[in-house]
Amino acid sequence: MIELTDSALNAVRSAISGAGQEVEGLRIMVEAGGCAGFKYMMGLVNEANPADHLFERDGVKVFVEEGSLAYLDGTKVDFVNGLEGSGFTFENPQAKSSCSCGKSFG
């Protein structure tokens, strides 16, 4: 399961409303790379893939491909505003390590 905080939910809703095209939801996935071995990837999508796992909160759909699910299970996604800027953060119980940027894990 993937959890969006209220702040992340509002940020995704804002991105969807400003997209200028029809958007079905948010895709979150994991790819090899980053400073710690794997990196989080996110983007708005206009349609789901048949093999996607769907998580939904208050009408916002989050799609996760099968290959990324094991790496993301139990992850809490937040959106923070700070002195160094704003962006999404990931609290991932599957990560054994992470880099200081918060965008990659091992």
Image (tube, rainbow, N blue to C red):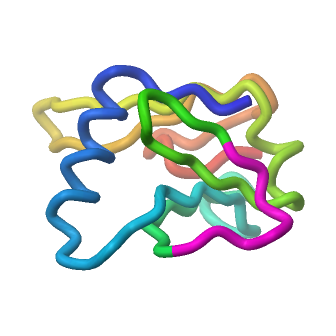
Q: Residue at x 64, y 54 (%)?
A: 63
Callout count:
0
Q: Residue at x 70, y 59 (%)?
A: 30
**Residue 9 placement (x, y as % from top left):** 35, 33
Q: Could you tell whether 34 is left or right of 15 in the image?
A: right
Mostly what secondary structure, the magenta segment?
loop
Q: Could you tell whether 75 is left or right of 57 in the image?
A: right
Is 85 placed above or below 17 here?
A: above
Seen from the viewer's position, the closer of residues 90 and 74 is 74
Residue 26 painted magenta:
no
**Residue 28 placement (x, y as % from top left):** 59, 55
Is 36 placed above or below 60 here?
A: below
Quarter of the picture holding the N terminus: top right
Quarter of the picture holding the C terminus: top right
Q: Could you tell whether 55 is left or right of 11 in the image?
A: right
Seen from the viewer's position, the closer of residues 81 and 25 is 25
**Residue 65 placement (x, y as % from top left):** 78, 61
Looking at the rendering, which quadrant does residue 93 occupy? top right
* Boundaries of the magenta span: 47-54
Is 24 placed above or below 53 here?
A: below
Q: Residue at x 80, y 55 (%)?
A: 68
Seen from the viewer's position, the closer of residues 86 and 20 is 20
**Residue 55 placement (x, y as % from top left):** 65, 39
Q: Residue at x 57, y 60 (%)?
A: 27
